[in-house]
Image: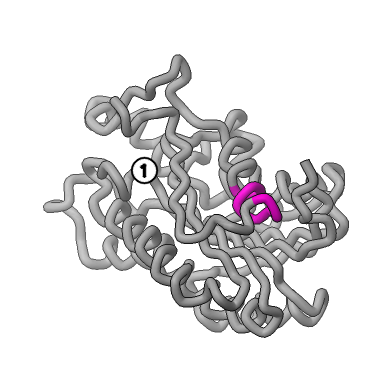
Amino acid sequence: MDTGLQDKVVVVTGATANIGRATALAFAAEGARVVPVGRDEEAGARVADLARERGAADVFWRRADVTVAAEVTALVDAVVARFGQIDVLVNNVGGNAVVAPFVSTTPEQWRADLDVNLTSTLLCTHAVLPHMLAAEAGRIVNIGSMSALIGDPFMAVYSAAKGAVHAFTRVLALEVGRSGVTVNAIAPYGTVPEDFAAETSAGSRFRPGTGLFTDAEASRAEERAVFRRNTALARQVARPAEIGAAAVYLASEQAAFVTGHVLQVDGGVALT
């Protein structure tokens, strides 16, 4: 299948670990010009090298904190200066400030969850969208979550923030569709790295020994078990590459008539 992504300029935020890493590599395999974005220089260099190995037409690693407006502006300016365009934006950055009952959380933790999951998406989209509208073409793919659709106990603000990402996706699709830009989202469930040591970055929630989820798994396993659900399949978790493949589809020419959609990659967990 010819995805039409050869030489397209693809910006992937949070590209140093897990879903973002796999997504950047999936676009690389399509011959795109890939811009992996993250905060961990060492992990970013590894992803950039792998993207070249996978067949990327070009790789432009950029360090940026996409919750900070000035850094997002600098990022987009640098990409446009180098390539003259941005064809695809994958808003992948996400995470959790805390895994705990809502009643015991703080406003500072709420703001952190909202910033990394929602504000980052708004900032990056706002900075990239004028270039897509001027070109009358573009693909925006937002990484949401099944948490937004079914809710995860102890992750109330995260679930709410991802719900806002889904709503933003639908509304923006209505606003920009006639300008040649499609806007879609992916709602993954239970996506974990296949190799935790190799596929995580310094700030990853799955980082062995320091990540929020790996720490919770080790120290609060009974609490964590409350929001585990069964899929309809034998396998209970998604692989990062499966989310990357979904992003490639939504950015491809084959998905030109798909917009405002939230694609569930959940193993049928919503059915159980």
Q: Residue furthest top?
A: 234
Query: To which quarter of the image does residue 111 belong?
Result: bottom left
- The stretch in magenta equals 247-254
State the image coordinates of residue 20 (x, y, percent, origin top left). Answer: 60, 50
- The answer to which image quadrant residue 41 occupies is bottom right
Figure colour scheme: one colour
Q: Is 63 on the left or on the right of 231, as rendered? A: right
Q: Position of residue 152 (x, y in %)?
A: 26, 42
Q: Count the numbered circles shown.
A: 1
Residue 113 found in image quarter: bottom left
Res 206 seen here: yes
Q: Residue at x 59, y 70 (%)?
A: 181
The residue shown at (60%, 52%) is: 250
- The kind of secondary structure the magenta stretch mainly shows is helix
Q: In the drawing, does residue 92 fall left or right of residue 50?
A: left
- The residue indicated by pointer 1 is 146
The residue that appears at 46% across and 28% down in the rendered structure is 237
Q: Is 253 included in the stretch rendered in magenta?
A: yes
Q: At label 1, which amino acid type do we have?
A: Met
**Is residue 185 found left or right of 6 in the rendered image?**
left
Instruction: Name the element at disc 1.
Output: loop
Query: For the point 70% across and 55% down, which residue is it?
Result: 253
| 106 on left or right of 32 | left
Residue 18 shows in this picture: no
Q: Quadrant of the N terminus?
A: top right
| Label 1 neighbour load within 10 Å: few <14, some 14-19, many 20+ | many
